[in-house]
Each structure stands twice: as structure tokens, then as C-alpha cells.
Amino acid sequence: MTIFSNKYILSFFGGCLFLLSSCIKDLDFASSAKLKWSKDTVYFDTIFTRDKTTGYPISVTKLISIKNPENRWVKADFSVVGGKNSPFSINIDGVAGPEISGLEIAPKDSVFVFVQCRLQANNQTQPALVLDSLYARVGNKQSKLILAAYGWDAHYVKDTVFPANTIWSDQVKPYVIIGAALVAPGRTFQINPGVKVYASAQTVLYVLGDLQLNGTAQNRITIKGDKPVSSTEKLPNQWGGIWFLPGGKGNLEYSDITNASVGLRADSTGCGNSPCVNLAQTRIQYCGTACLIGLGGAIKAENCLFADAGTYTFLAYFGGKYQFNNCTFAEHSNFGNRQDGSFAVTNTYRDGNGKLLSSNDLDLKITNCLVWGYKIDEITTDKVTQSAWAISDENNYFKSKNENTHWNKTSNIFNRDPLFENVSNGDYQLKSNSPAISSANIATASTIDILGKQRKSAPDIGAYEKF
């Protein structure tokens, strides 16, 4: 074994340092060069202006690259015109702005620019454009990147309990819920026509009192994730959803609830023979886990769309009482790797290993509805005889390979494609050659559809009427 003395080790590292310093001294920097940006503008679509009581909201991070086109090194200086007061913040290869000096870029190499923005309130009723610029200089050559964003003022509600009756009615300025919100017992939370509500990632709207969504055909209510841009309108899991706790009740009309993890959940509630949650002309779509869940709940829905969920368009768990008429349940999202049908009903309560823990009566009435999706069987059932199992079904289109199990084979149509307009785009209106047209039971069908349009004398099955 050869053992090196300390003086040899010191001599070796000293030589390395000498060579390294010689290389650095020999770097050939261009005295002037114009950098190439991967794009000329960083554009943020509509962003809510800042809530003064929190750091919320902050935009997503945009990424661009800057290339040195020279065959020589360059030293670049960067500066945001607005300086420290700019709503835009930059970070270039780990160095934060608003001013960065002497950033070295190798020949033909690139650096990456990360841009975020926080916008101040503008006291405007509509989104207002905010502009700034990021300049790059190498010697006497300069180039710039335009920074642009639309800021939208909003009403903010953060981690709130509504202890008194509350009404939201501003159709122009949206409402943003940050964190959780609770409708207290004995209190009413009312949202009027045309109101837009946005919810943060941590938001769940809990209801122990009374929730009233009073939309109209002309002015629907929207509740969605807090990114008011078209690129995220079909993405799930942007917020938690609406959760009716035991004792909570509500009426939701002409409302669009999207982008949640669970769009609406109704737990066991004591409303007697009446439904605790009434849904009419309402759309619940693009949900990560489920559009509608009843845990021993009592729900009535008419002219509603429940579509595009990771696992369930509807789940009746641990029994409950449910009434559906002229509704469409459709799952074509591929958000999750589900194995079961998206329309699931059970009177059981099981643990994670499938062991039966309890059961509860199930009462389901479904008429003039469409249950469809990309699986061979879109219906899942789990029945035990310890509790009641009552299903009344008529004039529905079901996709199921086990039509004889629990369903009325003579009163429903099985495995016949209803021909939706465009499932890849989330459009579940009927094509003109759909077999579901004029197939509803006139005696039980709704007189209007999900859009509030008067149905024909021979009405269609599902939420949408084809004219």
C-alpha cells in the first residue's frame, strides 16, 4: 500500500487550483451580444388581486429560457423596470431579482427565468391589464421581455363561519373563499343569480344550516376553483366541494359546480320524508373523486348533470333516500384509474378490507335518466338483506352487463349508446340522431330541461332537451 505524505497532497490540490484559476482567467467574454428569449411576452391570464390580510393569491409560475447565441461567454445584467414595487418577481437560475448583475452564460447555453406575480387591488369592476418589462443587457446591446397580467378585484372570505344570515348578490365582483367556510346551524347562506364564487385549494363549504343557491336560467351561479382561466376549467381537485353535515339542508337551482374533489356530499340528515338537499337544473362536473355522494343522505335532483369524475358520478353509500328525474350521469374523464361503475348504490358500510360493519335502508327512485360512460358496466351495487333495498326505475338508459341484478329490464333500455354531442369536451347534450330523443315518459318527465328550456310534447331522456 502506498501512503502519500501531506506535502504531496497539498501539492496536488495546489496544482488543481492553479489550473482552475487559469481557466477562469482565460474565459473569453463577448463585449456585446443580444440574448435570445424563448418568447417575447410572459402573459398571465386573469388573476385575483391581492387580499390585504393575507399573501393570497399568488400566480402560477411561468418559465421561459434565455439563450446566449454567441460562441463566447457573456456577462448579462437583468432588471425589472418596476423595481421592488413591481407586482412581478423574477428568479434567474436561482438568483432572485428585481436586479441581477453579471450573470455569466456559457457559449450557446441558456438560463431559465421563473416569473410570478402578485397584483394589487385596482378598484375596477372588470379585470384590468397590468404591464411591466424585464430588460437584459450585454454591453451596449439590450433586449426585453414584456410582463403582462390581468388583475380582477374580488370579495374575500377567509376561514369563515357564517354566524348570521348571509346574502351574496354582487354579479360583477366575484367572491373568493380562502380556506374553509361553515354555514352555522339555524343560519341561511343565500347566493343570488349571476354570482361567481371561486374557492381555494383548501376550501370546503360545510353546511350545518341552510344553503340556498338561487340561480336562474338567464343568470346561473358558478362555483369553481380559484383559477379563473380557460386552461383550468376542466381540471379536478382545485377545491374540496360542498359538504352537507348532519342537520344541514339546501336548495340549489341553476348552478354550475366544477373542479372540486367531491362536488357535493350529503351525510345522514334528519329531514323526515322530505329530501334535505334539492337540486334542480344544476351541473356538477370535473371532480377528482365524485360528483355527488350521499352517506345515508336524502337527495332529490331533477334536470341535473353529474359528469366527469375520477371515480363516481353518484355514490349512495350506507343507504339513504334518493330521487332522480331527467338527470344525466356520464363519466368519460379518465381522471382516475377506476375499476367500478361510476353510478354506485349500496346499503352497506364496510371497512377498508371490505368487512361489513353496518347497513342502512336504501330507497332509490330513478326515472328518465341516462347512466353512461367508457366502462363496460357503469353501475355498481352492494346489497345486504339486513336492511331494506327499494329501487324504482323506469325509462332510463343504463350501461350495464348485469341488467337483471337489481333493475327493471322491461322498463329500461340497456347498453344502447345515447349519442352525446362531444364527450371529450364535456358536452353531454344529445346528437340529433340520439335514440334518447322523445323517449321519456310524458307522465313523469320534467316540463323544462337543465337550461330552463321548455321540453317538447314528446320529451327526451336526460338533462338536456334536443330541439
Image (spheres, rainbow, N blue to C red):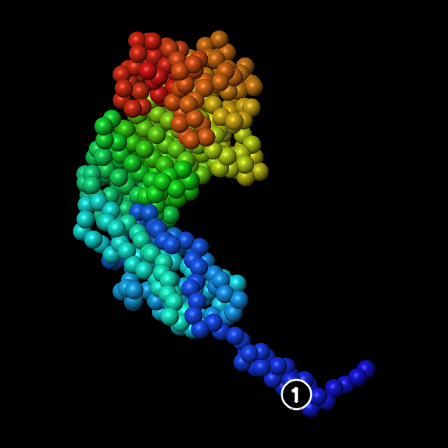
Residue at 37 percent across and 32 percent down: it is 284
Q: Position of residue 259 (x, y in %)?
A: 38, 39
Please state if 14 lies on the left or on the right of 408 as rendered.
Answer: right
Please state if 122 lies on the left or on the right of 106 as rendered.
Answer: left
Please state if 223 lies on the left or on the right of 285 as rendered.
Answer: left
Q: Which residue lies most toward the bottom here? A: 7
Instruction: Please state which of residues 363 and 16 is positioned toward the viewer in this rendering.
Output: 16
Q: Is residue 449 above or below residue 332?
A: above
**Residue 420 shows in the view:** yes
**Residue 268 shows in the view:** no
Instruction: Please state which of residues 193 and 115 is positioned toward the viewer in this rendering.
Output: 115
Q: Position of residue 82 (x, y in %)?
A: 28, 64
Residue at 41 percent across and 35 percent down: it is 286
Residue at 32 percent across and 43 percent down: it is 228
The crowd level at tag 1 (other Cα within 10 Å; few <14, some 14-19, many 20+) is few
Can you tell which quarter of the image residue 192 is in?
top left
Please state if 184 lies on the left or on the right of 37 as rendered.
Answer: left
Residue at 34 percent across and 30 percent down: it is 283
Q: Element under label 1?
A: helix
Can you tell which quarter of the image residue 434 is in?
top left
Instruction: Please state which of residues 96 and 173 is positioned toward the viewer in this rendering.
Output: 96
Q: Is residue 211 above or below residue 45?
A: above
- For disc 1, the marked residue is 10
Q: Position of residue 444 (x, y in %)?
A: 34, 12
Q: State the quadrant of the C terminus.
A: top left
Residue kind at label 1, given as amino acid type: Leu
Can you tell which quarter of the image residue 96 is in?
bottom left
Q: Position of residue 104 (x, y in %)?
A: 47, 71
